[in-house]
Image (cartoon, helix red, strand yellow):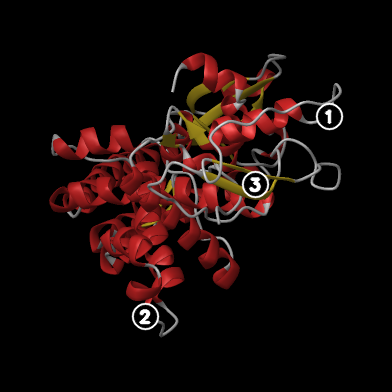
Amino acid sequence: MHTNYIEKLEFNKIIDILTNTCITEIGKSLAKNLQPKNKKDIVSMLLKETTEATTLIYKKQIPPFAEITNFDYIEKMLKSNSSLNAKNLLEVARILKLANNLKIYFFDDNEDTTSLFPILDKYFSMLYINPSICAEIEKCILDEDSIADNASGELLNIRRKERNLEETIKNKLNSFIHSASYSKYIQENVITIRNDRYVIPIKEEYRSNVKGFVYDVSSSGSTVFIEPMNIFELNNEIANLKLDELKEIEKILFRLSTLLFPIICELKTNVEIMGKLDFIFAKAKYSIKLDGIEPELNDNKFINLLSARHPFIPKASVVPIDINLGINFSSLVITGPNTGGKTVTLKTVRTTYFNGLQWASHSSKRKE
């Protein structure tokens, strides 16, 4: 349809509403690029698609959609056999979990969904689920900044050693700051960390009385943070364990990433299908809001609208119209005063019937 007609029919406003109703970026993109169709079989399929989604919402409420972020980057990394970070792995687990939840939503009720919702069945059936991979990722990664201790036996062993060393260091430093010999040098009785090393705050005037390494100075200059000599080696051991921990975490992330290498296409399909379903159900939600129904199509180039309403006028205020054209006559003259509904009527008819083609995807009421 020509751009001028699109604008005059306020189709762009419908698109804006539909876009904002979508949740996923793919769904929003499909809504923004929606154009009128003039092939009867395509129009019929799209109308039935929306009707199935509307019926399903009435039966089961709205499906559990959620936004999928950054999948293009995830796909690129997996295709190059690179390791994903914790955040991206959790996003993949989320994709798999969403797919599983959508399948449960659609199939888990002992009904013959294939016969009741044949078009939607095709989409929901294409969703790929893998509970074992999803569970493994969630077992190993607590959040985007935390890897679980039991992600591997080696990581558990390293962290156990770290905790034991930290306990030893804290005991030694507590003995130091509470001893009669050194308590007067202490700025306050706390153990702090500077540059990833355990230190104690010493009054600046006593810095020469405590043997150790200075790692920081307070902004006022009155406090220096010193690592006593007797914990130097222990801090070194912890630093080495931290490096071992990082290396082991890299191994864990790569191991989890390798689980995804064989299913890149399935994950991409999931994201695309979820975006498509989001778009379909956005149309259904908007249809419900308008109290719209599926129109009946015909090959005889006539329209017969009953109680058709303008979608942008509140239902309580709008005056529905009945109008037919092409059954007993092919021309119709509409007259009346200003604000009498002539333009609304023309827009309704123009949207439904354009250049001898059924633009039925925009009709809001049934053709009899």
Say which of 291 and 354 sits in front. 354
Which mark is first along the chain, 3 or 2? 2
Q: Which residue is mark 2?
A: 112
Q: Which mark is residue 340?
A: 1
Q: Nearer the viewer, mark 1 or mark 2?
A: 1
- Give the amino acid at mark 1: Gly
Q: Is residue 27 left or right of residue 170?
A: left
Q: Which residue is mark 3?
A: 179
Residue 14 at x, y = what percent? 60, 33
Q: Which element carries disc 1, helix, strand or loop?
A: loop
Residue lying at 45% horizontally and 17% vertically, measured from the top left: 2
Residue 78 at x, y = what percent? 19, 40
Residue neighbourhood size for the residue with mark 2, other residues' Cα within 10 Å, grouped as few (<14), some (14–19), many (≥20):
few
Residue lying at 51% horizontally and 22% vertically, measured from the top left: 214
Between marks 3 and 1, how big is the CA–CA gap?
95 Å
Residue 144 image-quadrant placement: top left
Q: Is residue 104 left or right of residue 329?
A: left
Q: Are marks 1 and 2 in contact (CB under 8 Å)?
A: no
Say which of 239 and 128 sits in front. 128
Say which of 366 and 311 sits in front. 366
Residue lying at 72% horizontally and 14% vertically, measured from the top left: 220
Q: Which element carries disc 2, helix, strand or loop?
A: loop
Residue 80 at x, y = what percent? 14, 34
Q: Is residue 181 left or right of residue 295?
A: right
Vertically, is 53 above or below 12? below
In the image, farthest residue toward the front:
328
- Give the amino acid at mark 2: Asp
